[in-house]
Image (tube, helix red, strand yellow):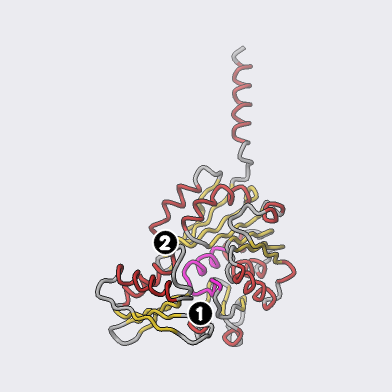
């Protein structure tokens, strides 16, 4: 494991952290920023090998002229988890996401979600996860969540939150086998393992995913580009009248998503922005996609009869 470090002004540190997080693929497995002094913030990026560490340093040099990045080889240790240790509990709507130690002091009335620091994305600290949790809570207040699909589940925090909010069942998918291992452990810790099914899959067309469709709620907190690619499949997997929660996109990427999901029988019903990241919520029309066409044909037949 290698650590790439650089220091400078806060805005640049946070911009670099966002960039290294959103790159697909990213050379960094984990990125953190913290205040080093009154005038400087430090950026730390953890990379699995020397080649990716060099790539990370190159990104910093290109995007932040004047910043000097150092590369340090680390002892054999789970530094991704170490970098996340000590993070405070996160509150998002009715949920509080934290490790076991922090949850002991959780406020009464909050829904606890036990997620330990680890390599799988979804500790609740990222703006995309918070936005999805808040959107999910709003939907749960308005309607039954029913059957849920969580594409790119990471730590499974969203699927766990859905089940703790009344969902009858959930399917969680991820392309990364290690993330699924962590997600399964989190499901057991949160006592939702019996109603949460995991699928190792890339995208949304796996046989098991299709077999359990349609879903009342589909969530996908990934990245803008794969969201655009998956838009037709996500729409088809959603039950008429169902809801879709999308995140993993920066605010300036919203038009790309809106263009991809328009014309799919979907209506944008909510949008939230947290720390430069957006979460979009769509509703699928109650009518099957071909119903307007059938209605139009009936109208033409009536019109022809009236003109006879």
Element on which disc 1 rests: helix
Query: Residue shown at 53%/65% (left/top)?
Result: 132
Question: Split into 4 quadrants, where in the image is the C terminus?
Answer: top right
- For this orientation, the residue located farthest to the top is 308
Give the residue pinned by disc 2. Answer: 250
Kindly indicate the quadrant of the structure image that contains residue 113. Answer: bottom right
Kindly indicate the quadrant of the structure image that contains residue 93. Answer: bottom right
Query: Residue shown at 54%/71% (left/top)?
Result: 121
Query: Residue shown at 61%/26% (left/top)?
Result: 297
From the viewer's side, name the closer residue of 176 and 185: 176
Q: CA distance from mark 1 to mark 2?
A: 24 Å
On the image, the x and y values in percent for residue 271 come to 47, 58
Q: Earlier in the sequence, mark 1 or mark 2?
A: 1
- Reply yes or no: does residue 133 show up in magenta: yes
Query: Residue shown at 30%/83% (left/top)?
Result: 40
On the image, the x and y values in percent for residue 60 come to 33, 72
Q: Is residue 204 above or below residue 3?
A: above
């Amino acid at each position: 494991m290698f650590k790439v470090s650089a220091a400078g002004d806060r805005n640049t540190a946070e911009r670099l952290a966002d960039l290294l997080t959103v790159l697909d693929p990213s050379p960094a497995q984990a990125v953190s920023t913290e205040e080093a002094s009154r005038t400087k913030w430090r950026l730390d990026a953890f990379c699995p090998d020397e080649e990716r560490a060099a790539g990370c340093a190159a990104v910093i040099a290109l995007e932040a002229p004047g910043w000097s990045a150092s590369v340090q080889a680390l002892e054999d240790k789970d530094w991704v988890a170490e970098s996340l240790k000590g993070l405070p509990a996160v509150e998002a709507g009715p949920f509080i996401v934290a490790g076991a130690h922090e949850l002991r002091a959780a406020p009464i009335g909050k829904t606890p979600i036990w997620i330990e620091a680890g390599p799988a994305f979804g500790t609740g600290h990222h703006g995309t996860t918070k936005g999805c949790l808040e959107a999910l809570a709003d939907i749960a207040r308005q309607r039954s969540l029913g059957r849920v699909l969580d594409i790119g589940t990471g730590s499974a925090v969203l699927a766990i939150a859905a089940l703790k909010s009344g969902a009858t069942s959930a399917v969680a998918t991820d392309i990364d086998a290690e993330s699924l291992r962590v997600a399964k452990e989190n499901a057991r810790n949160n006592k939702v393992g019996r109603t949460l099914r995991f699928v190792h899959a890339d995208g949304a067309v796996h046989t098991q995913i299709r077999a359990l469709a349609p879903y009342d709620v589909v969530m996908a907190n990934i990245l803008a580009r794969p969201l655009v690619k998956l838009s037709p499949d996500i729409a088809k997997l959603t039950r008429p009248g169902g809801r879709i929660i999308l995140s993993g996109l920066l605010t300036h990427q919203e038009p790309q998503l809106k263009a991809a999901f328009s014309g799919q029988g979907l209506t944008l019903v909510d949008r939230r922005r947290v720390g430069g990241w957006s979460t979009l919520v769509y509703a699928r029309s109650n009518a099957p996609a071909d119903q307007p066409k059938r209605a139009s044909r009936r109208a033409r037949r009536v019109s022809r009869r009236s003109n006879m």
